[in-house]
Image: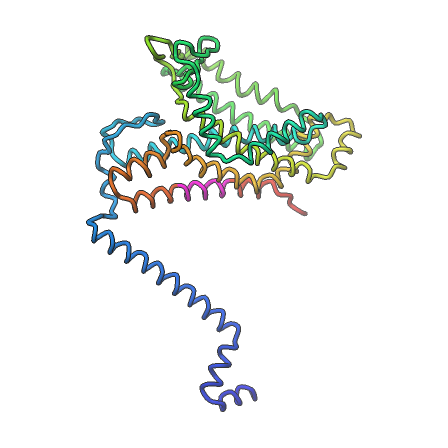
């Protein structure tokens, strides 16, 4: 009270100094100033952009989405014609980008797991081959690898007449990869339902076997029952429904193949380059995760007579996942964003058909850039959210 009385008697200058010396007041003041600067900067950028666009008779609206695009796209995962709208082009670009991201994530994860375990092999040759694989490929620019695979491998493949074939069903040439296309009948729904039930049964059996092992110490077989549940029910349902699945085989007619599914060489080159490049980083994540688990657990499992494969699968890897998952999230996000390099070899992903062709034709730079950034941001947040939930699910819960 005495200090307040003295400050009150000292005049306005002393009260202002006392206020500025208050830590809580300074914190609120600095945050308010920062927020004000951000708002002013945003207002300046928006007003300046609107003014410049009005001077050039340009529009920032989304009314162009219903206009016909008028150009073709070489590879589409969903139906598309040249007369479709720009909104349809945006959806085609999203579908192609997600296809690349999902396939590359699966392949890079499998390859990275193999490379990471090979780095820990006791075999000198395997360990050093894996080491140089990582050192060479992760230190080479990804764009260079994509171009090398496309122009150095796939464009140099033989012509369709001299295609490399396997079992008269799969053919590879300089126009891409040709594989059989499935032709489903009305009875295919029965087989599909049986497959879904088999997947649900396999998931339930896996959880039951894990609970039995953790609570009662009983080891139940997992691999054989899961494979049986995934194969037998759909096979029996297909036989009962009269084999509702046929195959459209690719056949050489004239100068090219007809029938089947054609995967363009740009897609093959992009997938291979993305998978190999990212597998180097995932392999190092796997190696560091396995090495983070105490070596005493491996020695204890060996003393109990547990086979090395089961030791790695049931003891080491489940604990290593807690170290592997956080950096793995970043690698999955990098795959999604690095897929935009497809524009270098002409694969029609979102950046190619939307940010390039559509932007040049329509001239709507701001809405197109905003929609593209919004898509990549949304996908990255979704992947991050899913992986973080999985990471929390496998954390060790202390009692």
Q: Where is residue 234 drawn, in percent x and y?
A: 48, 17
Q: Nearer the viewer, residue 279 or 134?
A: 134
Q: Quadrant of the N terminus?
A: bottom right
Residue at the extreme right of the image, as rendered: 303
Q: Is 389 above or below relative to 171?
A: below
Relative placement, left or right, of 75 versus 18 is left
Q: Residue at x 42, y 12 (%)?
A: 241
Q: Nearer the viewer, residue 318 or 325?
A: 325
Q: How many marks?
A: 0
Q: Residue at x 68, y 40 (%)?
A: 292
Q: Residue at x 33, y 44 (%)?
A: 369
Residue bounds of the magenta highlight: 376-386
Scheme by which the image is coloured: rainbow
Q: Is 228 above or below relative to 330?
A: above
Q: Where is residue 41 drawn, in percent x and y?
A: 36, 60
Relative placement, left or right, of 136 versus 35 is right
Q: Where is residue 253 drawn, in percent x and y?
A: 34, 8
Residue 205 lies in what quarter of the image?
A: top right
- Whether residue 273 is in magenta: the answer is no
Q: Nearer the viewer, residue 88 or 119?
A: 119
- Whether residue 381 is in magenta: the answer is yes
Residue at the extreme bottom of the image, as rendered: 9
Relative placement, left or right, of 257 versus 148 is left
Residue 357 lies in what quarter of the image?
A: top left
Q: Where is residue 177 drawn, in percent x and y?
A: 42, 18
What is the chief secondary structure element of the magenta stretch?
helix
């Amino acid at each position: 009270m005495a200090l307040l009385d003295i400050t009150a008697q000292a005049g306005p200058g002393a009260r202002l100094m006392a206020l500025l010396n208050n830590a809580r007041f300074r914190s609120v003041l600095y945050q308010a100033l920062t927020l004000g600067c951000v708002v002013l900067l945003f207002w300046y950028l928006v007003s300046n952009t609107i003014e410049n666009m009005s001077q050039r008779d340009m529009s920032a609206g989304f009314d162009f989405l219903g206009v016909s695009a008028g150009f073709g796209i070489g590879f589409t995962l969903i139906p598309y014609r040249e007369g479709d709208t720009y909104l349809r082009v945006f959806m085609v670009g999203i579908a192609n980008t997600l296809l690349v991201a999902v396939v590359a994530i699966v392949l890079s994860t499998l390859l990275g797991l193999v490379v990471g375990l090979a780095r820990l092999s006791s075999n000198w040759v395997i360990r050093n081959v894996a080491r140089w694989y990582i050192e060479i490929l992760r230190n080479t620019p990804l764009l260079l690898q994509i171009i090398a695979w496309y122009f150095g491998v796939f464009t140099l493949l033989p012509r369709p007449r001299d295609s490399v074939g396997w079992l008269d069903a799969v053919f590879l040439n300089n126009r891409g990869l040709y594989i059989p296309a499935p032709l489903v009948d009305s009875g295919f729904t029965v087989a599909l339902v049986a497959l879904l039930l088999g997947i649900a049964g396999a998931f339930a059996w896996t959880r039951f076997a894990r609970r039995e092992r953790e609570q009662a110490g009983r080891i139940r077989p997992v691999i054989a029952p899961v494979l049986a549940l995934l194969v037998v029910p759909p096979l029996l349902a297909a036989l009962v429904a009269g084999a509702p699945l046929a195959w459209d085989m690719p056949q050489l007619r004239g100068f090219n193949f007809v029938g089947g599914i054609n995967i363009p060489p740009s897609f093959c080159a992009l997938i291979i380059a993305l998978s190999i490049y990212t597998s180097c980083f995932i392999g190092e994540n796997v190696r560091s995760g396995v090495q983070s688990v105490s070596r005493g657990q491996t020695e204890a499992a060996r003393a109990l007579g547990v086979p090395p494969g089961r030791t790695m699968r049931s003891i080491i890897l489940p604990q290593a996942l807690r170290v592997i998952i956080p950096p793995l999230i970043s690698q999955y996000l990098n795959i999604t964003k690095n897929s935009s390099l497809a524009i270098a070899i002409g694969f029609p992903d979102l950046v190619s058909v939307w940010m390039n062709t559509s932007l040049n034709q329509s001239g709507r730079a701001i809405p197109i850039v905003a929609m593209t950034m919004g898509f990549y941001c949304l996908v990255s947040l979704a992947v991050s959210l899913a992986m973080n939930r999985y990471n929390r699910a496998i954390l060790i819960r202390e009692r």
